[in-house]
Image (spheres, rainbow, N blue to C red):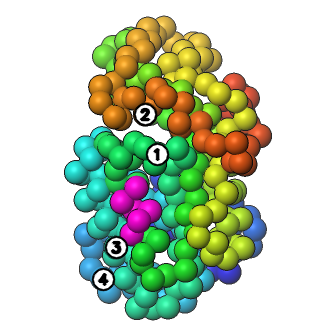
Amino acid sequence: MRIAVCGGTGTVGRHVVRVADERGHDVVVLSRARGVDVAAGPDAAVDAALAGVDVVVDVLSTSTLSAKGAVAFFTATTGRLLAAERRVGVPHHVALSIVGIDGIDASYYAGKLAQERLVAAGGVPHSIVRAAQFHEFAGQIVGRASVGPVTLAPRTLTRPVAAAEVAEHLVAVAENGPVGRAPDLVGPADDTLAAMIRRLSAHEGTRRRVLEVRLPGRYGAGLASGALRGGPDAVRGRLSFDDWLRSAVRAG
């Protein structure tokens, strides 16, 4: 199977590329680093990259927390991908989204909900895969929301999962053909972002003060509500956050 991975050099994408390659698939990576800018590059370059592809796995992302910015990014990239897929005849589009966001149409999640709606109406057979927040998110927050040894952690109740396990799930969905809404994937245990950051710092031997803050508005309420843990029917990942800290998966 020829699989195109959009965002194939990112947190999840690099694992999708690895898993697909290990399973014997022919992998095409679409990213700005590889010369294909899905957001703003020429249509001809996207069409050429997708020619002969059996399935597109879209794990593109943006760092913005602006609802307007997130909607603009995901609408632009997803719209261009779907248009290219229709032109060259790609038979399956797989999009990665986030569990529990239906009632949180704000900030970054507004963009993911807009993406889901576009995929569902896009005219290409599709699978939407929702996953919980990644274990890797703890380190990302340290990088983005720290002032010296102090990190501000949004109050977040989640059921985190390793990006490598998300990749395994995405490739399995890609192999099995379009299903519309695929099974959700969450981690094996409830956790909070602040507690994850504290354990990450302890594991790395760094002295860090973590201040948990409740963000305002619908976004903050959604983060704290527990909705991001997913539902009872979600598939459970195997690797806990603490096991991930010690694992070769994280090191890799």
Q: Are marks 1 and 2 in contact (CB under 8 Å)?
A: yes
- Of the numbered discs 1 and 3, the one sitting upstream in the chain is 3
Residue located at (65% from left, 27% from top): 190
Type of amino acid at the residue the image marks with label 1: Ile
From the top left corner, tell me how far across and down residue 107 is, in percent: 31, 42
Q: Nearer the viewer, mark 1 or mark 4?
A: 1
* Residue pointed to by mark 1: 101
Q: Nearer the viewer, mark 1 or mark 3?
A: 1
From the top left corner, tell me how far across and down residue 100 is, in percent: 52, 44
Q: Nearer the viewer, mark 2 or mark 3?
A: 2
From the top left corner, tell me how far across and down residue 227 is, in percent: 53, 36
Q: Are marks 2 and 3 in contact (CB under 8 Å)?
A: no
Q: CA distance from mark 1 to mark 4?
A: 31 Å
* Residue pointed to by mark 2: 222
Q: In the rendered view of the protein, which quadrant contains the N terminus?
A: bottom right
* Residue pointed to by mark 3: 79
Q: Secondary structure at mark 1?
A: loop
- Of the numbered discs 3 and 4, the one sitting upstream in the chain is 4
Q: Are marks 1 and 3 in contact (CB under 8 Å)?
A: no
**In the rendered structure, does residue 251 fall within the stretch colored magenta?**
no
* Residue pointed to by mark 4: 43
Of 87 and 185, which appears nearest the observer? 185
- Of the numbered discs 1 and 2, the one sitting upstream in the chain is 1
**Which portion, as a residue range, is magenta?**
113-118
Type of amino acid at the residue the image marks with label 3: Gly
Type of amino acid at the residue the image marks with label 4: Asp
